[in-house]
Amino acid sequence: MKAPNWKASIEKVKVPGNARVWALGGACLVMLALAVMMVRASGFRTAAEKGTLPSAGTMRLVSVEKVEEKGHAEARQNLLPGGDFRTWWAGAPAPQGVTPPDPGASKLERADGISQIWQRPEAPGSITPRMRLEAGKLPAGTYELEALASGSTGGAVSLGVWGRSGDSGFEPIDDDFITILPGAGQAKQYARRFTLDKADAVVVSSHALFGMLPDSKVVWHTVRLTRVGGTG
């Protein structure tokens, strides 16, 4: 079979002169558009190499958060490590961040938080035999101590706030800062504020008041210390 002569066939087609002009003009427009696109692409690549624009596909959205919400969360940060009582390793005498009490006075058991059970009240004037949480050195300002607790049974319990009195000792800022009276076991929220006139280490300790019966207990769900005012 003889191959068709395409050149001869094309030459036989009569194309008006004005159609040829329009075809040539259209081809020129296409070439111009392609040239503009290539120049733009080159410009974007150059800008990306200079660091003004990222290369395509190199950016992705990780998270979105409101600045005021983040600031509020930071302001409400609990300054007592372990105050939520969530991390309690097997075999440890107390949750992480909590100094356990003298077992001759009271003991800690796992609960929705921790359950503290007393055999006798602690003697006043020292926090050594007490369960305590330490905030470390804090700047001057106003602070709020909050406790969510259930109880107590058999007597009243207090949370005291202590400050450092020297290189190793502490003295009470208010040893009965929050007092939890005997109740039916419902969880209640307690809160009070105090002011540090100067930077100081702060310790929060619990103790039973005199007159408490043996095996009396309170359940600490959370204990929080937050800064609510002041500069420094």
Image (cartoon, rainbow, N blue to C red):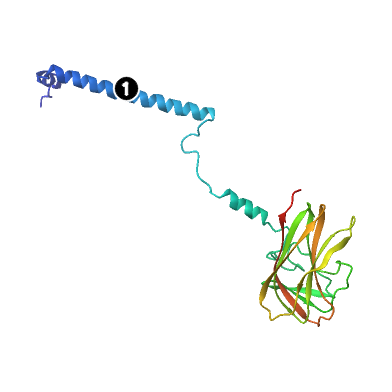
Circle 1: is it few (<14), some (14-19), or many (20+) Cα within 10 Å? Answer: few
Residues 125 and 4: in front is 125
Residue 223 in the image: state x and y as whole percent: 71, 65
Please tell me whether mark 1 sits on a helix, a strand or a loop. helix
Residues 195 and 127: in front is 195
Residue 81 in the image: state x and y as whole percent: 73, 59
Q: Residue at x 59, y 50 (%)?
A: 68
| Direction from residue 19 to residue 123 in the image, left or right | right
| Direction from residue 41 to residue 2 in the image, left or right | left
User: Which quadrant of the figure has residue 86?
Assistant: bottom right
| Direction from residue 11 to residue 62 in the image, left or right | right
Instruction: Report the number of discs.
Output: 1
Disc 1 marks which residue? 32
**Residue 80 makes an appearance in the image:** no
Residue 92 in the image: state x and y as whole percent: 75, 67
Q: Is residue 173 above or below residue 140?
A: below
User: Which quadrant of the figure has residue 163?
Assistant: bottom right
Q: Is residue 170 above or below residue 185?
A: above
Q: Residue at x 73, y 61 (%)?
A: 144
**Residue 37 makes an appearance in the image:** yes
Q: Is residue 162 above or below residue 108?
A: above
Question: What amino acid type is highlighted by mark number 1?
Answer: Leu
User: Which quadrant of the figure has residue 108?
Assistant: bottom right
Q: Residue at x 74, y 52 (%)?
A: 230
Residue at the top extreme?
A: 17
Quadrant housing the N terminus: top left
Residue 185 in the image: state x and y as whole percent: 68, 79
Residues 198 and 218: in front is 198
